[in-house]
Image: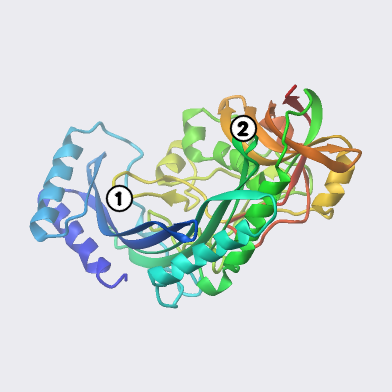
Amino acid sequence: MTAQLAPLTQSLLSAAKKAGADTADAIAVDGRSVSIDVRKGGLEQAERSEGLEIGLRVFVGQRQACISASDTRPETLAAMAARAVAMAREAPEDAYAGLAESHQLAMLRSADGLEMLDPAPEPDPATLQEDARRAEAAALAVGGVTQVQSASAAYGQQAIWLAATNGFSGGYARSSRHISCVAISGEGSGMERDWCGEGRVFQTDLPAPEDVGHLAAERAVARHGARRPKTGAYPVLYDERIASGLIGHLVAAINGASVVRGSSWLRDAMGEQVLPKGLSLHEDPHRPRASASRPFDAEGLQTRMRDLVADGILQGWVLDLSSARKLGLESTASAMRGTSAPPSPGTTNWALTQGDASREDLIAQMGTGLLVTSLIGSTINPNTGDYSRGASGFWVENGEIAYPVNECTIAGNLRDMLGRIIPANDARAHVSHVVPSLLVEGMTLAGD
């Protein structure tokens, strides 16, 4: 898929130089996807999309502008370049804007060895429909399930090529395959819903549709008869399937864009304890068959493994070139971008140190508290870390699950919460964000 994209980006760069740009970079993204939804055993919806998007960023001195299009005719490329240069000349100066220096550029310019693209043929729509049907049938076969809201299967493939006037030119392709199911138990106002979704880079790694449907159904049935829990201060256990969101708040707070703006509750925490001693948060952009892997970032810099947090101590920010220059630091090769905007910092695959205890061990350790399996809404103060979210899950008494709960709110402060987390040992290794179930003591719970 990438073969046609390299000359296209070079044509964009040539057009930019002819239009008067001092420097420029260009990105081309070619993608296709198909998704099938099934309901009551029949086809509910089918969607297919294919498209080629191109983006051009030009610099005139310290002024920059971005423009994108989906038309690749030569006259369109010339018009894009002329418009982008005209926009840049009217833009305010940015002392920190600019391409990478040649010595900063990645030597690895392909995804060889990362297994990001499944060589298997694209599945036909009939295969996807059958996967979705099998997931739905498995869910409906579970006693207590009154209906299946949706059962879906999808496939996608995308190729990306990045080139710049500093000499960088490289690209890669990636694929994805998904199955999901949403099941409902109960009727009327007593309905409860839960789901299961699985995604993989390689189709052969995907679980059987029956497993996905059955798990969605079991989760929905377990939630039947949910009620509001007690108000008070209790330990809260974040189930593995949502625990990465809690660590994600830490990752967002060390994003260079937030640090530069001063809108981060960790802006003064460099070198300080942000997780319990013994816990590390490790980023690895080169994990094979992981959906967020990439050989280089959106500015052509070599991605690399590193500890965001080591032994509980914050090690560094997540930086692209612009945010790094503003802070007087070096980029961490964390730039990400689409076709219509300049790069911004972001992360790839990361993993939190797992604990020794199982989730069941932590439930027993809780005594009385809340096991959270679903979160809704979000009130996070980016400056203070004050945290409040709607939650549902299961009430725990005497170290055992007692009954399902819903319509409650959990609250605390992220700096305090993350400083006392206790991890389980149940993280799934194949997901991009590998985080086990997390126990947080002493959170405020608002219920009845």
Element at badge 2?
helix
Q: In the displayed structure, does residue 434 sit left or right of residue 402?
A: left
At x 27%, y 59%, the residue is 51
Quadrant of the image for the N terminus? bottom left
User: What percent of the width, then of the height, locates residue 166?
Assistant: 29, 58
Question: Which badge, 1 or 2, comes first in the chain's sequence?
Answer: 2
Judged by depth in the image, the label closer to the viewer, 1 or 2, is: 2
- What is the three-letter code of the residue carrying label 2? Ser
Q: Count neighbours of disc 2 (C-alpha within 10 A) and say few if under 14, some if 14 to 19, many if 20 or more.
A: few
User: What percent of the width, then of the height, locates residue 205?
Assistant: 57, 71
Say if 76 sits above or below 416 in the image. Answer: below
Residue matched to label 1: 339
- Splitting the image into 4 quarters, where does residue 448 fall? top right
> Can residue 288 be seen here?
yes
Say if 338 sits above or below 191 in the image. Answer: below
Element at badge 1?
loop
Between 118 and 109, the one nearer to me in the picture: 118
Residue matched to label 2: 189
Between 63 and 358, the one nearer to me in the picture: 358
User: What percent of the width, then of the height, locates residue 123?
Assistant: 42, 72
At x 47%, y 29%, the residue is 261
- What is the three-letter code of the residue carrying label 1? Thr
